[in-house]
Image: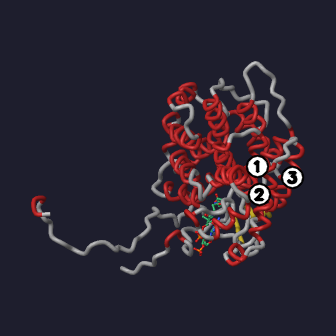
């Protein structure tokens, strides 16, 4: 006792054991519940992957149908919660809007305040999966001053989200199947990533026995930061800045000299010291998706040049910095018509099942204790109080 190890950023400290997600950062391997991400990306769907992450096995057809039906049934937001969006400024960033609305779910569903009641956890799980896309779409609608659309539960989760985001009331909305498929794929690729900053946050908050909504709301706030989920927006800002004001070489030089702390956003990862397997899948599909959607993008050319230069440059090679999941996603989101500010919301929609799976795993693990890191105190030793006139 009295002995603690200092490990800023938890670089070498495991906080839990988990069965959900496996990463081999040296080899660039990612598996959900043992299934390689490449196979899931090619053959599965986001809802099926959500089921896999949360319940541990791929569903049978009957289980998948039942799960889909239950999620579809809960997409509607309470009318009072809808009014909540009017309280925010129109130019509000959608991430705090998202986390606030999720936090508010605890007030509308007070049965959720029993984190050990299995039935309540189950209904909270379904409500979150069903309502987060509606909340996200309303955050968007509010920001552009357009009317909210009620969900159409005859549509799949991703289609419904796209319709609520880009559609108009009383107008048919032709959901583009290529866009639906691409977004579903991106959600699969974001669905879990073991103990990243936001998932660790969800676990830490949940370890105090806070309910699912409170814990996920905290996770959304953790994801907001530019070193985590906010990187997908930051990549696009960076590419636009390069296009408008400087060339790629000058920018890379700045990064290498660490001028003003500028980093190559969308590059580097705590765990991957090899090509991020998610980035490899996204890069492969980015061209295809962009050309299918008729978007030839000069920013994509800049991104590719940046990658080529970085992968051949000693600074990046020595530090094992490769493109991560966020490097190419923004370009696809942009081609779909999402504003840059909204990209991190899309990450949150994808990561939701992973957060839920980790929260549930933690709550049912008898080894769980309240998260309470220690510290190494480096402040003043004992000293005597001095009255204000003598300071
Ligand atoms: N550009 C330039 N240099 C970098 C970068 C980068 N993107 N990432 C790391 N480095 C350098 C860093 O300066 C340090 O160099 P030195 O040894 O000379 O001081 C070395 O590489 C190690 O970096 P670190 O900050 O100790 O690494 P970390 O594991 O603490 O940070 C990271 C990981 C993802 C925060 C970091 O790589 C980064 O800031 N990347 C840019 C932001 C980004 O793309 N984030 C998304 C991550 S993936 C999805 C997600 O989690 O949301």
How far, Cα to Cα, is label 1 from label 3? 10 Å
Q: Is residue 182 left or right of residue 116?
A: right
How far, Cα to Cα, is label 3 from label 2? 12 Å
The residue depicted at 63 percent of the width and 32 percent of the height is: 138
Q: Nearer the viewer, mark 1 or mark 2?
A: 2
Residue 227 in picture, x, y percent from top left? 59, 59
Res. 302 image quadrant = bottom right
Location of mark 3 (residue): 287
Q: Is residue 225 left or right of residue 300?
A: left
The residue depicted at 25 percent of the width and 75 percent of the height is: 381
Q: Which mark is residue 331?
A: 1
Which residue of the protein is positioned furthest toward the top in this rendering?
170
Q: Nearer the viewer, mark 3 or mark 2?
A: 2
Label 3 CA crowd tier, 10 Å (few <14, some 14–19, many 20+): some
| Callouts 1 and 2 close, C-beta under 8 Å | yes
Residue 193 in picture, x, y percent from top left? 67, 61
């Amino acid at each position: 006792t009295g002995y603690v190890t200092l490990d800023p950023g938890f670089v070498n400290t495991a906080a839990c054991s988990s069965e959900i997600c496996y990463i081999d950062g040296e080899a660039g391997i990612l598996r959900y519940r043992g299934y390689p991400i490449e196979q899931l990306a090619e053959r599965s769907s986001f809802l099926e992957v959500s089921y896999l992450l949360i319940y541990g096995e791929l569903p049978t057809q009957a289980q998948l149908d039942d799960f889909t039906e239950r999620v579809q049934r809960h997409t509607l937001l309470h009318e009072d919660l809808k009014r909540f969006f009017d309280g925010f400024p129109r130019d509000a960033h959608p991430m705090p809007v998202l986390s606030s609305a999720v936090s508010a779910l605890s007030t509308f569903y007070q049965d959720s305040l029993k984190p050990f009641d299995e039935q309540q956890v189950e209904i909270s799980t379904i409500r979150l999966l069903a309502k987060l896309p509606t909340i996200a779409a309303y955050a968007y609608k509010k920001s552009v001053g357009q009317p909210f659309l009620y969900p159409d539960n005859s549509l799949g989760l991703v289609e419904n989200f796209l319709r609520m985001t880009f559609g108009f009331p009383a107008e048919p909305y032709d959901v583009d199947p290529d866009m639906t498929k691409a977004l579903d794929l991106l959600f699969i690729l974001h669905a879990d990533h073991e103990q990243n900053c936001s998932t660790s946050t969800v676990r830490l908050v949940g370890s105090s026995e806070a309910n699912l909504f409170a814990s996920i709301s905290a996770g959304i706030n953790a994801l907001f930061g530019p070193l985590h989920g906010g990187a997908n927006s930051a990549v696009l800002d960076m590419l636009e800045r390069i296009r408008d004001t400087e060339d790629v070489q000058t920018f890379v030089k700045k990064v290498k000299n660490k001028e003003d702390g500028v980093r190559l956003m969308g590059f580097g990862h705590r765990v991957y010291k090899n090509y991020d397997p998610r980035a490899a899948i996204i890069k492969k599909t980015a061209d295809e998706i962009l050309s299918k959607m008729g978007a030839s993008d000069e920013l994509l050319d800049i991104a590719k040049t940046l990658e080529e230069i970085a992968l051949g440059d000693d600074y990046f090679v020595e530090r094992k910095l490769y493109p991560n999941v966020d490097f190419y996603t923004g370009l696809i989101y942009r081609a779909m018509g999402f504003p840059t500010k909204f990209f991190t919301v899309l990450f949150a929609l994808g990561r939701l099942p992973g957060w839920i799976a980790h929260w549930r795993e933690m709550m049912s693990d008898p080894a769980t204790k309240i998260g309470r890191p220690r510290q190494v105190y480096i402040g003043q030793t004992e000293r005597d109080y001095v009255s204000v006139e003598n300071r």
